[in-house]
Every structure is written in C-alpha cells, then in structure tokens.
Image (cartoon, coloured by chain):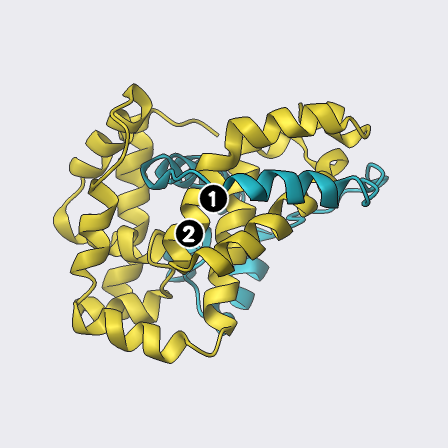
Amino acid sequence: MSEIHSAVGSYVVNALDPDELEEFEAHLAVCPTCTREVQEFTETAAELSLLASATPPAALRGSILAAISEVRPLPPESFGRDRTC
Amino acid sequence: LITLSSRGHEEAFAELYDRTSQRIYGIILRVLRSPDHAAEVMQEVYVEVWRQSARYSQGRGSVIAWMTTMAHRRAVDRVRSVSSEVARDERYAMHGGDREIDQVWDGVEQRLDVERVRKGMASLTPIQREALTLAYYGGYTQSQVAQLLKLPLGTVKTRIRDGLIGLRDALGVEA
C-alpha cells in the first residue's frame, strides 16, 4: 500500500492538512481503489452521525424554510463534476 | 424527497429536514460545540442542500451520506477558521481529548441503529476508536490528533483508516 493511499481515512473525516489534501485529491482522481474506499468510508462515517444526534432549536426550521423559499435550486449539471460540497 | 426538492417542492424539503435534522445538527454541534455557530452552519448546509438538490447523484452514495459529509466538512471548516480555535485547542489538549470520547457515549437514544454503530465502535481497538473519534467528532486534523495522542502521524493516519475499515465491516456498509 502506497503512503498516499493510507490517507483515505483522514480524507473522508476531513482531517487532512491542506498540502496533503491537495496531494490526495490528485491521487484520488487516478486511483479506482481509493475512489471505492472513499465511497464506502463516506457511508460509514455518515453512520457515526447517529451517535451525535441532537434536536436543533425549533426556530431553526422556520428560518431555514424561509431562507430556501428565496433561493432557486440549481439546474441539473449538463456535464460530470465531482464533489459539489 | 431530494428529487422533489430539486423541482422546487418546499413541502418535500420540509420533510427531508424533519427526517435528517437531528443527525445533521448533532454532528455540526458536536464539532463546533457552540449552538450559535451550529445554527449558522446548519442554515448554510440546508440552503446548500436545497440549491444542490438536482446535482445530488445516486451513483455517488446515499442522500444522508451526502448531507452529513457536507455538514461535517462545513463544521470543520468553521472550526479551523474561527479565531477562538487556539483557545479551543488548548482547552481540549489539556483534557487529552478524553472528554470528547465520553461525550459520544452519553445521552443518545437507545435505538437499534444507534446500538449497531455503538457496537461497531466498541469492536475497534482503543487507538483506532480514539483516533477516529477525535478526527470525526472532534474535528481535529490528523496532525492535531497525533499531538493529542502522542503518536507519530503515520500511525494516526493508519489507525483512522483501519478504524473506518473495522466500522465498515461491522456495519456491513457497501459502496
């Protein structure tokens, strides 16, 4: 396993430092193994959020729903682009 | 729901909010530890989910994973950009991050899915669990985790990855 490959876990939990993040993303673009692992780990890390569950302030719901009513959803992409967030 | 949202259905989006808000708010609050910051990031995340709803692609994974990833990343970005970061790090460094780990185990509803994740975490080695906990729930970079646990960076990197492999296998997650 190459040195850079081992960064896949830290990448998924947003723990890479900026220089290594850049290096890993360049590697990810050409490594199907890492791409698959990123997908699996992303689903896995999402499960971790269950242990942190907390009820948001009730007022937040109203302010978010008011905010989105003034924002237009973007149209679907006409070309492939990765990682929108 | 995400598809309906992408077509501008606000009621569908409200239902999506109701189904996901505890997990999304929970992870943001856990990382930020400030209800004020958490509310701001929460609003940013849901507005972005609404904006990007047509660009969510099933081929890239589940809706909840897409959303928690976005929430976690934005919470971590906020932690790393706020000026109180130094104070926060010093405070938590003094406790060696132990408190972080305890918090994760307290006060969570005893639901089956929660229990599964809890068991998965318990199946990891202590170092895997600590490294993963500090990185995910604590929002620390791997170098900060290495400092907190007094371990070489390479070891921390491997433990975080091994922890995710162990958890993935324990939960039977497939891409």
Residue for point 27% across, 51% down: B133
Disc 2 marks which residue?
A: B29
Q: Amino acid at mark 1?
A: Tyr
Which chain does the residue under circle 1 lie in?
B
Instruction: Answer yes or no: are tags 2 and 1 on the same subunit.
Output: yes
Determine whether label 2 and label 1 are within 8 Å by CB: yes
Q: How far is disc 2 from disc 1 in space, using C-alphas?
A: 6 Å
Q: Residue at x 57, y 56 (%)?
A: B40
- Quadrant of the snapshot with the N terminus of chain B: top right
From the viewer's perspective, is residue B39 above or below residue B20?
below
The answer to which quarter of the image holds residue A43 is top left
Callout 1 crowding tier (Cα within 10 Å): few <14, some 14–19, many ≥20: many
x, y percent for residue B92: 25, 69
The residue at 51%/36% (across/down) is B21
Name the foreground residue: A19 vs B147: B147
Q: Which chain is cyan?
A: A
Give the left or right position of residue B20, taking residue B138 as reference.
Answer: right
On screen, residue A66 versus residue B153, left or right, reads: right
Query: Residue at the location (16% across, 53% down)?
Result: B127
Query: Residue B170 lies in what quarter of the image?
Result: top left
Q: Amino acid at mark 2?
A: Leu
Q: Is residue B111 visible?
A: yes
Residue at the top extreme, as displayed:
B112
Residue B25 bears which disc, if any? 1
**Residue B23 vertical placement versus B99 (above, below):** above
Pick the front one: B5 or A7: B5
Disc count in the image?
2
> SS class of the residue under badge 1?
helix
Task: Report helix, strand or loop for mark 2.
Answer: helix
The chain in yellow: B
| Residue B129 locus on image (x, y percent) | 21, 48
